[in-house]
Image (cartoon, helix red, strand yellow):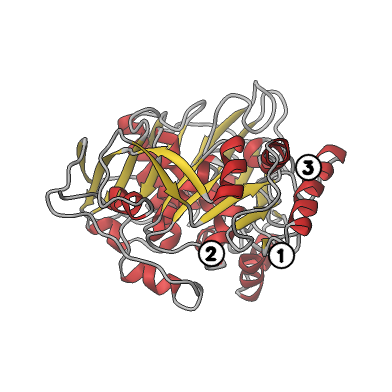
Amino acid sequence: MPLTITEKILAAHTDRKEVTPGEIINVKVDLVLGNDITAPVAIQEFKKLGFTQVFDREKVVLVPDHFTPNKDIKSAEQALILKKFAQKYQITNYFEVGRMGIEHCLLPEQGLVGPGNLVIGADSHTCTYGALGAFSTGVGSTDLAAAMASGEIWLKVPSSLKFIYTGQLSPWVGGKDLILFTIGKIGVDGALYSAMEFTGPIIQQLPMADRFTMCNMAIEAGAKNGIIAPDEVSLAYLKGRIKKPYHIYQSDPGAKYAATFDFDVTLLEPQVAFPHSPENTRPVSAVGNVPIDQVIIGSCTNGRLEDLRLAAIILHNKKVHPYVRLIIIPGTQEIYRQALKEGLIEVFLAAEAVISTPTCGPCLGGHMGILAKGERAIATTNRNFIGRMGHPESEVYLANPAIAAASAILGRIAAPWEVS
């Protein structure tokens, strides 16, 4: 029977040759991920259930990244739970502040995820790793506890949706715009518990940063996972990073999809998602006059080196608007270091931006950029729900790094060509 890439990976992690959508299956996992918000709950459950060992200390990853560097006593205690657990069970891949990064930027960078892997994480944006041809998805903390002990988890096999992108990309249009446009078309529940398989000539042209962005935001359409079949681009990214064996899967001709979407994106403009939903999208030319108070460039969605380079192109020899805060957060320490070597940090400082150590921070209203009542932010993050970045009466708009940087300069949501 012809299978999709998602079905092939799932089947390979069972004792079966094939699986079909809707089936409940038990799978072996290649990697289990927790952070400083979700892992402490999992660790409590781990103890409560009487587990005394992790299934493989090399395959459990703990990253304190949400409220770190610790913003208060409670967050410090959460992070300490991770460290003590890592010490007790000699977890190889524990990343303390100074060595950590935003988890979904960090794991691919460290070569911990490869094609054909099955990865679960107690964080909804674990679906990011589908950009490398892996099946990766978010789970609850109780499931994480069981998987840390057993190396297994049950899943329902998702049906697959195929998204084919053709045409030519206009300047300033990238992965963030493609996924916002797609979510705008199908809605935040348009891929509910489905695999979003991204393909077509446009996807093949995208660099890895843009692919990570698209798979990262599959969850914003309700998807179980996002995935892109491995090709020369993804294999080049993995070269020199990944040390463990991996397996490349492709969807079979004739594989069954619940639906197929064809998008010619030749005329697509950079997109902006208005409050309070990622599906509330419109082209930047239709935004109108929207003054802003804060700009965030970073997160697991757009905190990679390519994103910072894009922002630096816009901000070079310019200043941030006097009544706007521009906060830039490199996704990992290595991204920060490389941005420093390339002179990007100097561009940001000269523009009067603030540069933070890697953290999820403001994306979830954690710290490093909380909004007051009535304030507006434009961010390269992934969610703009009510109260997501602070006060329930604040507003968050989502966009790519070029729009975010241009907006920081003009003090209103702006297109990149207005300042370049």
Q: Which residue is painted at 67% across and 65% down in the image?
A: 92
Which labelled disc corresponds to residue 112?
Answer: 2
The residue tagged 3 is: 78
Question: Vertical placement of 348 versus 281: above or below?
Answer: below
Q: Which residue is painted at 25% across and 48% down in the image?
A: 18
* Mark 2 or mark 1, whichever is nearer to me: 2
- Give percent across and percent down for residue 292: 61, 35
Of all residues, the one furthest to the bottom in this rendering is: 240
Name the kind of residue labelled 3 in the image. Answer: Gln
Which labelled disc corresponds to residue 255?
Answer: none
Name the kind of residue labelled 2 in the image. Answer: Leu
The answer to whether one can see residue 236 in this image is yes
Name the kind of residue labelled 1 in the image. Answer: Arg
Q: Which residue is painted at 47% across and 57% down in the image?
A: 420
Q: CB atoms at circles 3 and 1 under 8 Å apart? A: no
Q: Residues within 10 Å of mark 1 (few under 14, many from 20)?
A: few
Distance between the alpha carbons at the discs numbered 3 and 1? 18 Å
